[in-house]
Image: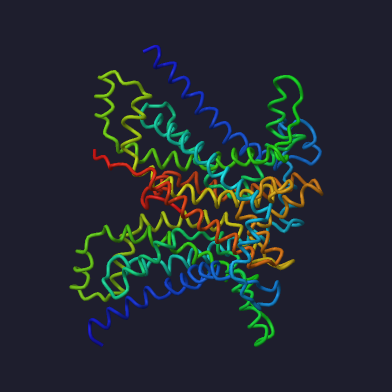
């Protein structure tokens, strides 16, 4: 028994140390966003002398974080709407209807799970730039690059394999009685799908929304590549990265940490609200890519 | 319109948008990666000329690429070993023993997974800062003042490993907790009656029984580490100092910035093939008879 309690103590020490390494830096960043610039040259462990909210207003105005935040909200909302409208009917049909080409399409989407967007971001960029050049010749200006809607469309497209995989496996597990009953009552295919089947799939839809929200909100490689025009629109993480990389020269620590908090806060709040759903949802689809 | 036609039309309308998007933004670009690696392309015009394996030949003798490949392999091995062992051990402790506050630990360890890589880079630059960083000032408590350059040429790769492990442990821990909780309690009870230690319980009961799940996650983890390493490098170090933290994907991305598209895609093809071969090999090596319980 004595041995077991020593072993338990060791576990606790390990757990507490790891928790500290997670919680302390996150809390430190939040506190640092309220510090004035001179405070960053002293002891890093000192608490802020006051709540210097000016960092946030400066971040919003001079560093344009307010504008970037709006772009991020627009892109994330658009991409979420697109992915739901596009992937729900597709996943429903792929998992519950026998039709010509079904298994081939399913195999394609499964293979898509292994295509990571980091590999294909350059060809996507070139494809859009070539498209812009063609448009320039015809209309005088291109609109594919530096366009928030196109960015949202690319987000939705690259999230398709994971989303369809997760939704399909959920739909496949539902009994067929629901549809049969609906058809007998005279409902059409579309009506049955939207009114009967989608509500039944609510748990998996919530999981899909959560995971895709996090990945769209946090994404920065595609965004950085497709929104590259100087003075053009930016999403929040890219704006923050530019601020961080410019920060060494200008030493605007306070504004930088305020920007960091702006990117982090929505995800943290969401996590606190739904952490149980999120960690349970992980196992719905088995693995995330 | 008859019933079969109506059904077909419905299916077509449902599946077509997803299929179109998938082909345009995923399959075609993937195909392009492979095709473009055999071409040279102007930086601003879309004129291409076929160069066969020239891009690959140059690549294999490019010292920056070789360094990036070495870094990538080192990162894959180190991050996989540390993350997997920590995640498995923590998950085992949390499911096997009634740890007081276990739920709290689970919630906290998962936090890094929901943060943007850009945010994590910001957090770690506060930690690693040589002058006023959290790590150096913490270490200085034990005596003399320490000013290690955590992002210096010799240390940067280890600093990256720590950040990558920090980010991934919680996610995989939660994943393994789910599969470990399916292991029947009676197994552990009979084992402890036979006098088995926790140590042997872990290796003789838990690991074999979650092996299938472990194999799948391992394959995914290797692929995802290649990607995460790129995201971290791009936001945290930009490959520096002096290429010390360059990985293959960031090398690829930088070539694109220089307008060397064919060359960039050749690097992409190599890492793509490498990641597939590696996951295939891991899958084969870890193959065991599936145990039922």
Residue sitting at x 36%, y 54%: A203
Question: Please, is residue A264 above or below residue B148 in the view?
Answer: below
Q: Position of residue A37 (x, y in %)?
A: 79, 41
Number of numbered labels in the structure image: 0
Let me know if residue B109 appears in the view.
no
Let me know if residue A169 appears in the view.
yes
Residue sitting at x 32%, y 29%: B204
With B65 as the anchor, is A156 left or right in this view? left
Q: Quadrant of residue A67?
A: bottom right
Q: Position of residue B227 (x, y in %)?
A: 55, 52
Question: Please, is residue A272 above or below residue A88 in the view?
Answer: above
Residue sitting at x 47%, y 43%: B171
With A24 as the anchor, is B148 left or right in this view? right
Q: Could you say which is closer to the camera, residue A109 or residue A190?
A: A109
Question: Please, is residue A224 above or below residue B45 in the view?
Answer: above
Residue sitting at x 55%, y 61%: B269
With B230 as the anchor, is A159 left or right in this view? left
Quarter of the image where the N terminus of chain A is located: top left
Q: Quadrant of residue A177?
A: bottom left
Colouring scheme, one of rainbow, by chain, secondary structure, one colour = rainbow
Q: Position of residue A20 (x, y in %)?
A: 57, 31
Q: Quadrant of residue B159?
A: top right
Q: Could you say which is closer to the camera, residue B30 or residue A67?
A: B30
Q: Position of residue A17 (x, y in %)?
A: 55, 28
With B195 as the anchor, is A156 left or right in this view? right
Q: Could you say which is closer to the camera, residue A96 or residue A26?
A: A96
């Amino acid at each position: 028994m004595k041995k077991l309690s020593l072993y338990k103590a060791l576990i606790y020490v390990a757990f507490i140390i790891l928790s500290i390494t997670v919680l302390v830096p996150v809390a430190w960043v939040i506190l640092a966003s309220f510090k004035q610039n001179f405070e960053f040259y002293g002891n890093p462990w000192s608490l802020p002398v006051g709540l210097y909210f000016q960092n946030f207003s400066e971040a919003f105005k001079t560093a344009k974080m307010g504008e970037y935040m709006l772009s991020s909200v627009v892109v994330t909302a658009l991409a979420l709407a697109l992915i739901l409208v596009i992937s729900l009917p597709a996943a429903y049909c792929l998992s519950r209807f026998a039709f010509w080409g079904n298994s081939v399409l399913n195999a394609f989407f499964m293979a898509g799970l292994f295509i990571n967007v980091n590999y294909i971001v350059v060809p996507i960029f070139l494809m859009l730039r070539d498209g812009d050049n063609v448009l320039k010749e015809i209309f005088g200006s291109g609109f594919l690059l530096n366009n928030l809607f196109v960015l949202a469309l690319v987000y939705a497209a690259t999230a398709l394999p994971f989303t369809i995989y997760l939704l399909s496996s959920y739909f496949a597990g539902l009994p067929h009685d629901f549809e049969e009953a609906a058809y007998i009552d005279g409902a059409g295919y579309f009506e049955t799908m939207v009114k009967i089947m989608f509500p039944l799939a609510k748990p998996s839809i919530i999981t899909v929304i959560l995971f895709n929200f996090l990945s769209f909100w946090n994404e920065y490689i595609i965004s950085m590549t497709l929104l590259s025009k100087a003075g053009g629109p930016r999403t929040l993480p890219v704006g923050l990265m530019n601020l961080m990389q410019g920060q060494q020269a200008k030493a605007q620590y306070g504004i930088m940490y305020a920007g960091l908090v702006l990117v982090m806060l929505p995800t943290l709040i969401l996590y606190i609200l739904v952490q149980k759903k999120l960690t349970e949802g992980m196992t719905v689809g088995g693995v995330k890519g | 319109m008859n019933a079969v036609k109506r059904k077909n039309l419905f299916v077509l309308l449902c599946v077509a948008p997803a299929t179109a998007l998938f082909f345009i933004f995923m399959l075609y670009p993937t195909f392009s990666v492979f095709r473009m690696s055999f071409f040279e392309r102007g930086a601003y015009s879309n004129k291409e000329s076929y160069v066969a394996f020239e891009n690959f030949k140059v690549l294999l003798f490019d010292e920056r690429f070789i360094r990036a490949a070495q870094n990538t392999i080192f990162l894959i091995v180190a991050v996989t070993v540390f993350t997997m062992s920590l995640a498995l051990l923590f998950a085992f402790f949390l499911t096997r023993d009634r740890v007081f506050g276990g739920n709290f630990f689970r919630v906290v360890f998962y936090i890094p997974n929901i943060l943007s890589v850009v945010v994590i880079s910001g957090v770690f630059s506060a930690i690693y800062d040589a002058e006023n960083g959290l790590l150096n000032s913490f270490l200085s408590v034990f005596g003399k003042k320490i000013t290690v350059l955590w992002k210096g040429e010799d240390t940067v790769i280890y600093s990256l490993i720590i950040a990558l492990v920090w980010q991934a442990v919680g996610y995989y821990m939660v994943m393994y907790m789910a599969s470990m909780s399916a292991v029947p309690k009676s197994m552990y009870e009979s084992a402890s009656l036979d006098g088995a230690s926790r140590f042997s319980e872990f290796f003789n009961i838990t690991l074999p029984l979650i092996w299938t799940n472990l194999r799948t996650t391992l394959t995914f983890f290797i692929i995802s580490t290649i990607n995460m390493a790129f995201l971290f490098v791009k936001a945290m170090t930009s490959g520096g100092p002096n290429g010390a933290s360059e990985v293959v994907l960031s090398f690829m991305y930088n070539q694109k910035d220089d307008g060397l598209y064919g060359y960039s895609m050749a690097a992409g093809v190599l890492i793509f093939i490498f990641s597939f071969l590696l996951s295939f090999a891991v899958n084969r090596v870890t193959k065991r008879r599936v145990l039922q319980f």
